[in-house]
């Protein structure tokens, strides 16, 4: 169960958690046209609360809205301010932030242009997405029988609400079979992403991730590429097949919720020795240092709330 906090920002003002309600004829509830973000706030080593890459997340929120022809009735600065205000109201030093924009009630049917675009920001505590143990020891992944969207069937560059039916079905499928997370292949059969993560493999010291063609431009993915470059770890963005995961030395998922989660097994095959490898561990340690303000080079990724 999601852990309740005090306030949710809705359409310009803070309301009590239990009062953040919508009507059953909310358009997005029926047709899925809406967009959202997932952002994390961490306690830094000097006791402050800092939002990780706020600007990039808010920019992607507006990009997602642009893709689905939705005009957010607030500026980027106003959304940033709303996020800070909600975190402060909830007295949260650490947690997950969920901005969402959706079409409210009014007209029904597909051709609606007058329904109000409503915006909300909720925050709540959210620990390790795939478990504390998963972060340390790695998780077991399975290729789902569901493909990731064809790039001309769903808009994969946007964090669009309706797109997530595909992720949920893939996740349910593999969890029911006893695995921790799903790997989705694109419609050509190449590895695309996890249900809510981008994917990296390591082979012969080289990091590889899928190009952005059919996947969400993950901000954690971008952070990992930047961190690796700073550490002189070579990175290539090139598509790969499911059996390239089987013979990889290391593999990990990246995402705001999942952070950097090692994968120790995929489709019942051990990845490398079946435990997090040296490159994964170095990147993971660097990432957690950065989000907690321990790396002077990356302070510009942190937005201190208090
Ligand atoms: N791909 C997908 C499909 C995706 O949903 C996410 C984030 C990513 C890649 C990684 O993107 P980024 O967070 O910018 O590194 N998934 C969000 C939703 C998780 C949820 O269960 O809800 C997240 O991690 O916040």
Image: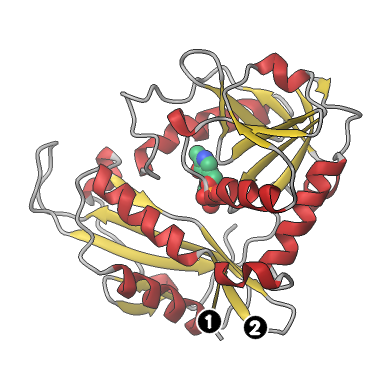
Residue 129: x %, y % from top left? 66, 51
Label 1 near ligand 1 (CB < 8 Å)? no
On screen, residue 101 versus residue 111, left or right, reads right
**Residue on which disc 2 sits:** 48
Query: Badges 2 and 1: C-beta atoms under 8 Å apart?
Result: yes
Report, in whole angstroms, how far the alpha carbon at label 2 lies from the one at label 1.
Answer: 7 Å
Label 2: few (<14), some or many (≥20) within 10 Å?
some
Image label count = 2
Q: What's the mark number on residue 81?
A: none
Looking at the rendered structure, the secondary structure element under dot 2 is loop
Q: Is residue 125 left or right of residue 118?
A: right
Residue displayed at 35% across by 65% down: 120
Secondary structure, mark 1, is loop
Whole-percent x, y for residue 60 in the image: 39, 53
Q: Work out whether mark 2 precedes mark 1 in sequence or the reverse, and give the earlier one.
A: 2
Quarter of the image with the C terminus in it: bottom right
Q: Is residue 17 above or below residue 233?
A: below
Mark 2 near ligand 1 (CB under 8 Å)?
Answer: no
Q: Nearer the viewer, residue 62 or 70?
A: 62
- Please provide percent x and percent y for residue 122: 45, 67
Q: Which residue is mark 1?
A: 305
């Amino acid at each position: 169960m999601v852990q309740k906090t005090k306030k949710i920002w809705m359409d310009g003002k803070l309301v009590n958690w239990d009062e953040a309600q919508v009507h059953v004829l909310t358009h997005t509830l029926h047709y899925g046209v809406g967009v959202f973000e997932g952002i994390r706030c961490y306690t830094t080593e000097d006791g402050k609360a800092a939002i990780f890459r706020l600007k990039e997340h808010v920019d992607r929120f507006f990009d997602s809205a642009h893709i689905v022809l939705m005009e957010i009735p607030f500026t980027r600065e106003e959304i940033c301010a709303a996020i800070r205000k909600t975190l402060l109201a909830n007295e949260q030093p650490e947690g997950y932030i969920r901005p969402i924009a959706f079409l409210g009630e009014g007209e029904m049917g597909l051709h609606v242009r007058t329904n109000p675009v409503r915006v909300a920001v909720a925050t709540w505590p959210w620990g390790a997405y795939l478990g504390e143990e998963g972060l340390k020891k790695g998780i077991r992944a399975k290729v789902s029988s569901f493909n990731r969207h064809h790039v001309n069937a769903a808009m994969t560059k946007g964090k669009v609400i309706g797109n997530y039916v595909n992720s949920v079905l893939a996740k349910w499928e593999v969890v029911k079979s006893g695995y921790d997370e799903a790997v989705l292949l694109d419609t050509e059969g190449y590895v695309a992403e996890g249900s809510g993560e981008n994917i990296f493999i390591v082979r012969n010291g080289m990091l590889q991730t899928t190009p952005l063609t059919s996947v969400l431009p993950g901000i954690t993915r971008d952070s990992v590429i930047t961190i690796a470059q700073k550490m002189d770890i070579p990175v290539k963005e090139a598509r790969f097949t499911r059996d390239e995961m089987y013979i990889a030395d290391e593999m990990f998922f990246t995402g705001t919720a999942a952070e950097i989660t090692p994968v120790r097994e995929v489709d019942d095959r051990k990845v490398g020795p079946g435990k997090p490898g040296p490159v994964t561990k170095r990147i993971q340690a660097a990432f957690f240092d950065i989000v907690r303000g321990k790396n002077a080079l990356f302070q510009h990724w942190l937005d201190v709330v208090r």
